[in-house]
Structures are given as C-alpha cells and as structure tokens.
Image (cartoon, grey):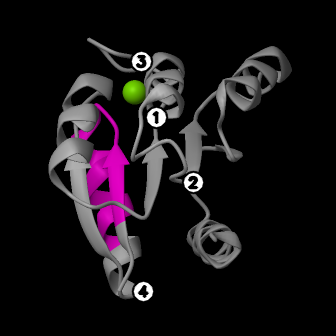
Amino acid sequence: MSRVLIVDDSRVTRRLLSSILKSDGYVVDEAENGLDALEKLSAVKTDLIIADLNMPNMDGMTFVRSVREAPYVRDIPIVMLTVSSDKGLRKEAMAAGTDVFMTKPINPARLLGTLKSLLKEKP
Ligand SMILES: [Mg+2]
C-alpha cells in the first residue's frame, strides 16, 4: 500500500485530502509546513508527497527544492496543490522539481488518477 505525505497549513484541506486518499486505500501522513514535512520524511518511508504552496515556516517551493537536494528522498514524486494558477509560479514549481502542479479546488477523481500514474512511473 502506498504511503502519501500531505503537506498543508490548512487543517481543513489536510482532512479533505486525507479522506479522499484513505477512501482509495492510501496510508496517509500529514505535515503542517515544509519543515514539519522534512522531519516526517526522515522518519517515515514515503511514496508520494502532496504539497501546498503557501505555508508558514517553510513554503512549498522551498520545501520541493529541499527534497530534491536531499539524499534518500530526492526521487519521491511531488504534486503541488495550490489556489494559484499563475503561470510563472507553475513554471518555478516545475523547475524546482515538482512533478505535477494542480490547482484548488480539489477534484478527487483527477487527483487520484494523477497519483496512480505517478506511482506507476516510479522505478
Ligand atoms: Mg496554505
């Protein structure tokens, strides 16, 4: 069973994502920001990350860069989920190492389909 780390400062969003993923059989961990997420990644073997962009302490962009620079976790697929559809931000996120950039509101079927294909691509 695949294990997904949800990184979002909004408790409501974490709950929503968590229930969508659990309903599809995923094991879910949650983090409130990038720093919290890096700590969790060092403790738990994670298959995929869903990260928000705007968060206190460490934002999504910095978090993605940190993951891509870190041994052991650098190859974990990352979905960035944000309210902004700004093209510049999307570009920056992809350059930082984001695999898929998605905008809120969350479309459960689309999200689950995206996770499935990312996990299939994994070596
Ligand atoms: Mg946020």
Residue 41 appears left or right of 100: left
> Which residue in the protein does label 1 denote?
52
Amino acid residing under circle 1? Asp
Q: Residues within 10 Å of mark 4 (few under 14, many from 20)?
A: few
Q: Quadrant of residue 107?
A: bottom right
Q: Give the number of the mark in front: 3 or 2.
A: 2
Q: Which mark is residue 24?
A: 4
Amino acid residing under circle 4? Asp
Q: Are marks 3 and 2 in contact (CB under 8 Å)?
A: no
Residue at (34% x, 37% y) in the render: 8
* Mark 1 or mark 4, earlier in chain: 4
Amino acid residing under circle 3? Asp
Specify the quarter for ligand 1. Answer: top left
Cα separation between marks 1 and 3: 8 Å
Residue 86 appears left or right of 11: right
* Mark 2 or mark 1, earlier in chain: 1
Residue at (31% x, 65% y) in the render: 18
Instruction: Please say if 62 is above or below 32.
Output: above
Q: Which mark is residue 59?
A: 3
Under circle 1, the secondary element is: loop
* Mark 1 or mark 3, earlier in chain: 1
